[in-house]
Amino acid sequence: MYTLLLIIHVLVCISLIISVLLQSSKGGGLGGAFGGGSSDTLFGGQGASSFLKKATKVLGVTFMVVTILLALTTGPQKKGKGGGEVSKELQKAIDETSQKEKPTPLPEGFEVLPEPTEKE
């Protein structure tokens, strides 16, 4: 399920990028680069812009839905699915680090002075 959603997600991303880049803007966009000013005649006079706008809307909504589905399928790991081993190793590393960072006691007769504060 996850692999299928990931493949769909990548295809929708690529399609969305292409549909946005092919739309003509004030400067002509990349749509005009693939055949000059006559590239709009492929879909008819204004047909290309309305088709690409609709395609962008559909692909945008699809992108958001697939993103949410991917987030839900890769939610918090349950202990039975291998999440326990990672958390044990992480806890072990945290324990080792916290033991190393404990300050060593000062020899007898020494004390820690507070840091000086700036006075104006």
Image (cartoon, rainbow, N blue to C red):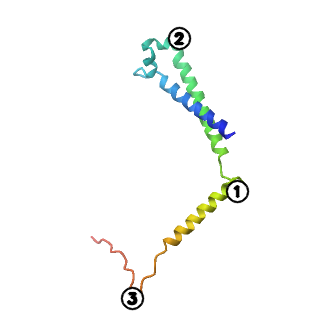
- Residue positioned most to the right: 80
> CA separation, marks 1 and 3?
51 Å
Contact (Cβ within 8 Å) of mark 3 with mark 2: no
Instruction: Residue 117: name its quadrant.
Output: bottom left
Q: Say which quadrant the C terminus sits in.
A: bottom left
- Mark 3 or 2, closer to the camera: 3
43 relative to 24 in the view: left or right: right
Query: What amino acid is at disc 1?
Result: Lys
Residue to which mark 2 is pinned: 44
**Up/down of 114 relative to 90, above or below:** below
Q: Secondary structure at mark 3?
A: loop
The answer for how far apart the CA atoms under marks 3 and 2 are is 91 Å
Distance CA(mark 2)–CA(mark 1): 57 Å
The residue depicted at 70 percent of the width and 52 percent of the height is 81
Q: Position of residue 38 (x, y in %)?
A: 45, 11
Residue at the image position 58 percent from the left and 34 percent from the top:
10
Circle 1 sits on which residue? Answer: 79
For the N terminus, give its image quadrant. Answer: top right
- Read off the residue under disc 3: 109
